[in-house]
Structure formats: C-alpha cells, structure tokens
Image: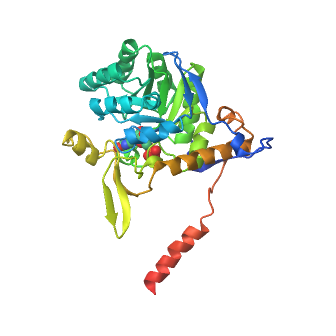
Amino acid sequence: MRIEQEVKLDFKDVLIRPKRSTLQTRADVDLTRQYTFKHSQLTWHGIPIIASNMDHTGTFAMANQLAKHQLLTAIDKFARLEDWERFQAENPEASAYCCATTGIKKEDEALLAKILQRVATPFICIDVANGYTQRFVDCIGALREKYPNKILIAGNVVTAEMAEELILAGADIIKVGIGPGSVCTTRLKTGVGYPQLSAIIECADAVHGLGGHLCADGGCVSPGDVAKAFAAGADFVMLGGMFAGHEECAGEKIQENGTWYMRFYGMSSREAMHKHFGRMNSYRASEGRSVNVPYRGHVEKTILDILGGLRSTCTYVGAQRLKELSKRTTFVRVTQQLNEVFSLLQVNEAHQDKSS
Ligand code: 5GP
C-alpha cells in the first residue's frame, strides 16, 4: 500500500486570479473552438460543451436547442433507430452536434452500426463507468478500425497513464471523471475516485502531449466550475446536473406542495437499471442515486447563463478567446468560495419561524 501525499484539488478548492486585460466588453469574447482530432483527422468547430449521455439530458429535444448555440449533445445509448432517423430528417444540421453513445456489448455495437449507416453524426461516445479494463481498451481499438473517420470519445479515467493508453488505443477524446457526478455514488459505494480539477490538469497534460483531446465529465455545479474545467485544460466539458430539470429533458414531471420537479437519476442507479433492463443484477451495487430536481423551464436560459459566465471569466483574465483561457489562468487555492451569509440567515429564519 502506498499513500500519495500531494494534495489533489476539486473545483471548490480554487478560484481563478483576475489579470489586467485590454478587452472592452464580454461581447468581444469568442467561445467557439476549432479542433482537428488525432486519429479521425476530422475538424470540428463549435462551443465545446456537451450535454451528458444520461437518458434525462441526452435527448433529441436537448440536441435541437443546444445545436442552435453550436453546443453538443451526447444522445443516450437507449435512443431508438427510428428516433435518430426522424431527428436527422427534421434537423439535418443539428446531427453534426450529436454524439452517438455506445456501450461495449455486442447489441450496443449492432445498434451503433445501424445508426451510423443512416445518420451523419461525426462523434461516437463509448461509455463505460470504468475505463480501466483491457476489454475496454480492445473495444476502442476495434471501433477505431471499423470507423476510421469518426471522432471517438472514450472514458472514464482520471489518471495520466490510462488516458495515454486510451489515446494510443485509438480514442480522439478522453473523458475524465470518476465519482464527481451530481447523482453518482461511486465514491460512497467503492471508495474510488480522484478530485476532478487535479484529474483534468494531470490528464490534459498527458493527452495533449500525444495530440489528443480531453473532455471533463462531471462535478460542475455552476458556470464558474465550467470555466475552471476549461481553465484547467479541458477541451470539452460534459454536463449532466446543470442541464437537468428542463423542458427538453426526458423524465417524469412531479408536483409536490405546489412546486414542479423532474425525476433525475444516475445511469447506474437502481432506477435506471430497472427502467432499461427490467432488473438490477444482485452482484452489482447501485452506483447512482435518484433525485427530484426543481423544474426549470426551457434550457435556453441556462445555456445563456453558462455562456455569459464563461465570457465573463475570459474577460477577467484577458482572454479574447476560450482558447486562451487556460494559458492565462493562475488558480489560487482557497478555503472559502462564497459568502453564504444570506443562505445561512434564511436557514436561521426558517428555524426561528418553526420554533416560534
Ligand atoms: P454531473 O454533471 O451531473 O455532475 O455529472 C454527469 C456525469 O456523471 C455523467 O456524464 C456520467 O459520467 C456520470 N454519471 C451519470 N450517472 C452516473 C451513475 O449512476 N454513477 C456514476 N458513478 N456516474 C454517473
């Protein structure tokens, strides 16, 4: 047994130090990026934020809205072929901003093949909870051989050596994050994980050294966290919880005491297993949970909020383009992020109301 003594960091442990800037207004900031990928040699242009391939957020309705802003959506792997076909027919341009998700089972691969025959999506997201198995590495190799011209996103990992291995196996983009997700219980159930900011910094260094790209996946709870993920070296940021609870999401709407909520659950939760497979195998623990998130209306407002925050971050450090953000970032370690006096007051007042 070994202990690594160096402190590893999460989004909550740092802030971005402001720098003198000549930018006039945040409207001057360009959030689009253009990437050419290592293996596929395809070039993609857009704002590199991806709605997670969870069945709640990875929907065609979400893709429709996000594509209008040049953001990506990873469509969940349970989407049916006919829904893909309808989407492609109704929104031919939006297909360029979709990822098809697949697992590593035979039937996943068969569905993927049919989708890619009919739909012009350039991205394939190979989704497994644990990106550390040899079977997964072999699967990336096989997919790369079969689809030399598709952009392969593979994960999830949190360490440099495995990120490198997946790139060498044929992945273009490595998805980084084990345990930080809003409805993930991996750390609780297994004790396994890695603080997300350090995981991004360390994996970005490794992946970029090989000409690959990195997608930070999980743990962002505010536009500030999205900015920190990019500042830490992520080329893409994937969001689940921040896109949850919107009209464009799939899932039950529930009314409780006059307030509307939407059901949101982890993809390896008991609820997801029952929904998609009709059962939960007894040898595996549920590594996700279910929550009711407040219903937030259309996702458009949330998109503008995230993009507005990001533009403002860039202005604070003098980055005219998102591309310059990480180069211009100095993180400072902090012991406090926010002044929470009013939220504490509200809690106290609620307490007093109850006791009086
Ligand atoms: P969020 O943005 O909500 O913090 O994180 C979203 C990410 O959490 C997803 O993209 C996925 O990688 C991860 N995730 C989704 N469902 C589960 C789950 O049931 N268990 C675990 N361990 N991770 C999950």
> Would residue 180 be visible to someone looking at this image?
no
Place of residue 87 in the rendered image (x, y in percent of width and height, measured from the top left): 36, 33
Label count reads: 0
Q: Is residue 101 above or below residue 333?
A: above
- The residue lying toward the viewer, choosing from 219 and 4, is 219
In the picture shown, does residue 169 fall above or below 19?
Answer: above
Image quarter for ligand 1 equals top left
Where residue 148 sits in the image (x, y, percent)?
43, 13
**Left or right: where 114 falls relative to 320:** left
| Colour pattern of the rendering | rainbow
Indicate the quadrant where residue 326 lies: top right
Please report the residue visible at 68 percent of the width from the left and 34 percent of the height from the top: 321
Q: Picture quarter containing residue 296?
A: bottom left
Q: Position of residue 193 (x, y in %)?
A: 45, 40
Image coordinates of residue 177 in percent, x first then y, are 47, 37
Q: Quadrant of residue 126?
A: top left
The answer to whether 205 appears left or right of 27 in the picture is: left
In the picture provided, is 15 more to the left or to the right than 62? Answer: right
User: What residue is rendered at 36% in x and 69% in y?
Assistant: 258
Q: Is residue 189 visible?
A: yes
> Which residue lies at the image location 54% right of the left edge and 30% below the top edge?
203
In the picture, the quarter occupied by the N terminus is top left
Viewer-proximal residue, 93 or 254? 93
Q: Residue furthest bottom?
A: 356
Taking the spot 37% from the left edge, 41% from the top edge, the residue there is 54
Question: Front-most of 159 and 147?
Answer: 147
